[in-house]
Amino acid sequence: MNNKLINNSKTDKLLLLINKILLSITVLIVTIPLLYVLLGSFLQPDILLTKGFSFDPKHWTVEGYVRIFNDGSIMRGFLNSILYATGFTLVSVGFTILAGYSLSVDNLAGKRIIMIYFLITMFFNGGMVPTYLLVKDIGLLNSPWAIILPGAVTVWNIILARTYFKGLPNELKEAGRIDGASDARIFLSIILPLSKPIIFVLALYSFIGQWNAYFEAMIYLEDRSLYPLQLILRDILIQNEVEPGMIGDQMARAELQRVAEMIKYSAIVIASLPLIIMYPFFQKYFEKGVMVGSLK
Amino acid sequence: MAQPLDTSANTNNLTSQTSERGKKKKGPMEYIKKNYILYLFLLPAVLLVFIFKYIPMYGVTIAFKDFSPLKGVAGSEWVGFEHFIKFLESPNFQQIFINTIKLSAFDLLFGFPIPVILAIMLNQVRRAKIKKNIQLIIYAPHFISVVVIAGMIFIFLSPAGPLNALLTLVLDRPISFMSEPEYFRTIFIASGIWQGAGFASIIYVAALSNVDPQLHDAATIDGASLLQRIRHIDLQTLKPTMTVLFILAVGGIMTIGFEKAYLLQTSMNLPASEIIDTYVYKRGLQAADWSFGAAIGLFNSIISLVLLVTVNTVVKKINGETLY
């Protein structure tokens, strides 16, 4: 653009060239591992091990995917994850939006105290063991609610929502009030329709966060049938376990290892599928999310 | 903005609700009754925070007690600092403490500047479409789950994996990366940069895009080189954001990436990979040594808090920017 008019010095031109090269290398560093896993999921594992790669169609296979679909645990984990992520998102976004709106209302008595009440949890927390004991005491152990409730409300998200509502023109609320609308009415018919961006950003991050989480499930859930996808994946990827449904009745040790190796790749692809599909749709909200966050 | 509305409030008594909110002329009960819906909106969040954040804060008193599930938090006997002393005197303490500090300090040292550099590099890309595509690609790993990242690390670094396949060109024996403690930190930090640096640059890129291009043009006409412009314009623009993020990062030093560290642990690399949080999990939950686990966790959060306050004070003295 403008820079073309201005004579860059020789070193500047050289630097810009180096910059282009470095950025290209960065892009390669990011993409190569991802492509390797994607392509690897369609390759025979022994080829992957011995040759590293092959373009020979004879070496290609969808066996890994077939085995995953034949075994119930990954699919059940997939469904559990959808359930948990959706439940978590509904609770989290709902409660956050409501609280954020109230805290954005001017002159609400006690607002400061409530804000401090929330803010304290940013600096102090009971930690892993007391939180676990509490969840156990109130009988949520081995229940999906243990995944959904404890982390649903975070101060940070409430601040995000409050900041967004504060940014909406006050005249709108006043106009509603002049027309005799109640607070609930104003919230439902005036504020909420204008809040799609913040709702979307919060929902997006809640959903992805929960979809990718394994830790709460690991400590709170005991039944394998309740496991979310990430925990099943952990067994497959990290602990090298093979689900019973993925293998035949009698399988030699070597064959077992071959299967274990193969399903790793396809399991990764399947687990990342929802995000890959959503990615183009939500990418325009990345910056919005960060920008809203930086306002404070 | 509020002026015209205030005058209308005098003439139109329908808006009296607004002014009451500020003046509280009537009794508190009346006030709450009038605005009850707003308090109702707050209730679920307040309740959840009370249950899942405040009750555990009381529960942390078990760090000073000999907690037994039968007696409950209140009924268990006080033992003072016994668990803390036990932890500080245990043979593992030094190693775990140093592991935690080293892992985070190196993570900060290498991980912090890279997003800044990336943003400055991206800022030099003139064609918007290319810039956007690069961003789209380098943001992507951020959304991959930690389990998948750990799984990919195990795949790539296994003795029969692709990295060793490349290395055998120069080495005669494959390296068992995940079983050697000496590689753990490098693996942890490098994979963290691979996954997070792109997305972390987003906030810096946004800050840089707010710089008036005329500033750069003027500087160029005055004979400033590219590096000079980066130093005096770009870095100055990024300084406030960098400061805040740096303070937050230091505050988080003691609570670094528990989830990933735990997944990347193997029995062989424990001498480097055991950090305070993973130790809390193993002792507190897995071994059901509740009080001991809670004590170590509390020890950790106190150090975090002290670090956060200290670095905030220091930074405030140095350049006047501060977090709160």
Image: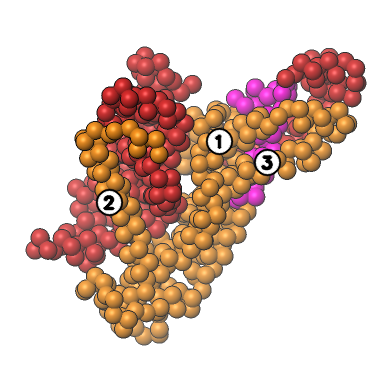
Chain colours: A orange, B red
Quarter of the rendering occupied by the N terminus of chain B: top right
- Is the stretch drawn in magenta largely helix, strand or loop? helix
**Magenta-highlighted residues:** A88-116
Q: What element carries label 2?
A: helix
Between A109 and A224, which is closer to the camera in this rendering? A109
For the residues labelled 1 and 2, the Cα–Cα distance comes to 31 Å
Task: Give the chain of mark 2.
Answer: A
Which quarter of the picture shows residue A101?
Answer: top right
Q: Is mark 1 on a helix, strand or loop?
A: helix
Q: In the image, B195: left or right of A225?
A: left
**In the image, what residue occupies the spot 33% across and 75% down?**
A43
Residue B316 percent across, percent down from the top left: 39, 17
Name the residue that disc number 2 marks: A25
Task: Give the chain of mark 3.
Answer: A
Task: Give the chain of mark 1.
Answer: A
Specify the label residue A195 is tagged with.
Answer: 3
Residue A188 percent across, percent down from the top left: 77, 41
Q: Can residue A225 be seen in this view?
A: no
**In the image, what residue occupies the spot 10% across and 60% down?**
B170
Q: In this view, does A246 lie above or below B110?
A: below
Name the residue that disc number 1 marks: A292
Q: In the image, A33: left or right of A127?
A: left
- Residue type of the residue flagged with mark 2: Ile
Task: Look at the image and say whether residue A84 sits in the magenta stretch.
Answer: no
